[in-house]
Image: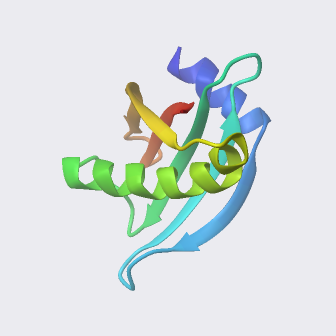
Amino acid sequence: MRESLAAAVFAATLATPALAAADFSYNMITGQLPGTEIVAAEVVRQPVFTGEKDEQVQAMDQAKTRLDTEYCDTRGGEFVVDQGLVVFDEGTGMWMVGGVCR
């Protein structure tokens, strides 16, 4: 499931860098899973994420801001994360954060 969602998100993507605190720079790819209401962001960071719980919160905050702007604001809602769609990929140091606009 994770691979198919990630592949779908990659297929319908927008990629732009974003700077957060002076110590971190973030980049993400966002997209909507075709045929569903699910939107997601794959978030990477410099320095690289290691999978810690506080990093998950950082990734979720970054994703919410971007997904609200790119998908949810125009729908009159806000991004709500689905905890079942928050996954850390150790191989890439990336957090995938998915959910819906409500």
Which part of the image, by quadrant, shows the C terminus? top right
Q: Is residue 36 left or right of residue 22?
A: right
Residue 47 image position (x, y, % from top left): 38, 69
**14 up-or-down from 10: above or below:** below
The residue depicted at 58 percent of the width and 41 percent of the height is 77
Depth check, front residue: 97 or 47: 97
> Quarter of the image holding residue 58?
bottom left
**36 up-or-down from 21: above or below:** above
The residue depicted at 71 percent of the width and 57 percent of the height is 15
Residue 50 shows up from this direction: no
Residue 4 image position (x, y, % from top left): 62, 19
Q: Is residue 98 left or right of residue 24?
A: right
Depth check, front residue: 78 or 88: 78
Q: Is residue 55 left or right of residue 34?
A: left
**91 up-or-down from 70: above or below:** above
Furthest residue to the left?
Answer: 53
Residue 25 shows up from this direction: yes
Residue 79 image position (x, y, % from top left): 52, 41
Residue 38 image position (x, y, % from top left): 61, 26
**20 up-or-down from 81: above or below:** below
The residue depicted at 49 percent of the width and 50 percent of the height is 64
The colour style of the image is rainbow
**Badge count:** 0
Q: Is residue 59 left or right of residue 35?
A: left
Furthest residue to the bottom?
Answer: 22
The residue depicted at 58 percent of the width and 51 percent of the height is 68
